[in-house]
Amino acid sequence: MNKDFIKTAVIGHPIAHSKSPLIHSHWLREHGLKGSYEAIDIEADALAESVRALVDRGYSGFNVTLPHKIAIMALCNEVDERAKAIGAVNTVSIRDGKLYGTNTDAFGFAQNVLCAGLDGWSFEDGAAVVLGAGGAARAVIYALLEEGAPSVILINRTREKAEELTQMDKKIMVEDWAKRDDALKGANLIVNTTSLGMEGKPPLEIDLSLAPSHALVTDIVYAPLYTDLLQQAKKRGLRVVTGAGMLLHQARAGFALWNGVMPEVTPELEERLLEA
Ligand code: ATR
């Protein structure tokens, strides 16, 4: 196996829309590395045999997206604590024929906010309000706790799903979807992790009037880049961080694992991603 040429990929179904090949190819070129990163379409019932084929063909690792983020865990020889806590693997490294699973979404979320250069704002300053309780919310909450948020107010249309996530930590409190406007009163951070606001989906209906003026507002939706939520926040004079960076920053961690170089998110790469 020629280890000078590092083969990597993203697997999922469907996968044609994935922006990950653009991101990784950009970094491979930027760092003058010999390697490849392809999008490979794998259907759910072919996962085990297809992953075995990647191992046999000498891949160094791969990203995992829908619908395989949970099923891949059973195929890994080891799953780290982060991925276990988040309940999903999105990045696999292959070493000596063995699969090591991790999750880089929490890193991506935290880095996107930390790299935004927000003077005088910190995760530790107050409560984070998280809207939504799906897989993305789990990664966001993991990051918030790791970065020292004193509490998390979790609000989801289906309250039971939010209740389930309180098992992650005692600092997580659940509030009713109907009371979301009031819940913003003490927010240091407001995060949308629902699919609302995405192109083709209805907007997230929320009134930011009660949010304190120091609150930061961020959205994991990045198409459109400025969702209704972020536009409303800007009108109110609140600081915002867009969602595209989370995708870029989570990709950095996988690239570093496979290629041994931690790449940077540059304005040029951000522009390329948004134009694609
Ligand atoms: P993922 O795992 O990628 O985060 P998901 O599990 O489908 O995706 O979660 C989508 C999130 O968007 C959920 O929190 C969902 O709320 P429910 O748990 O009540 O389904 C939320 N969501 C989707 N459509 C919504 C809508 N019309 N109103 C409110 N919340 C919505």
Image (cartoon, rainbow, N blue to C red):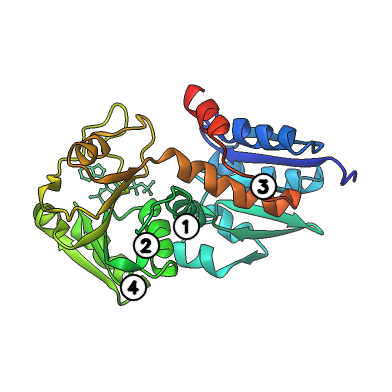
For the residue labelled by badge 4, is the local secondary structure a helix, a strand or a loop? helix
Q: Amino acid at mark 4?
A: Gln
> Cβ(mark 4) to ligand 1 < 8 Å?
no
Q: Nearer the viewer, mark 1 or mark 4?
A: 1
Label number found at residue 167: 4
For the residue labelled by badge 3, is the local secondary structure a helix, a strand or a loop? helix
User: Residue tagged by mark 2?
Assistant: 122
> Cβ(mark 2) to ligand 1 < 8 Å?
no
For the residue labelled by badge 1, is the local secondary structure a helix, a strand or a loop? helix
Q: Amino acid at mark 1?
A: Ala
- Residue 32: quarter of image: top right
Spatial CA distance of label 2 from label 1 is 16 Å
User: Residue tagged by mark 1?
Assistant: 106
Query: N-terminal of the two: label 1 or label 3?
Result: 1
Spatial CA distance of label 1 from label 4 is 17 Å
Q: Are marks 3 and 4 in contact (CB under 8 Å)?
A: no
User: Residue tagged by mark 3?
Assistant: 255
Q: Amino acid at mark 2?
A: Ser
Q: Residues within 10 Å of mark 4 (few under 14, many from 20)?
A: few
**Left or right of 227, for residue 177:** left
Query: N-terminal of the two: label 2 or label 3?
Result: 2
Q: Nearer the viewer, mark 3 or mark 4?
A: 3
Residue 17 visible, this orientation = no
- Residue 98: quarter of image: bottom right
Spatial CA distance of label 3 from label 4 is 31 Å
**Left or right of 67, for residue 47:** right
Query: N-terminal of the two: label 3 or label 4?
Result: 4
Q: Residues within 10 Å of mark 1 (few under 14, many from 20)?
A: many
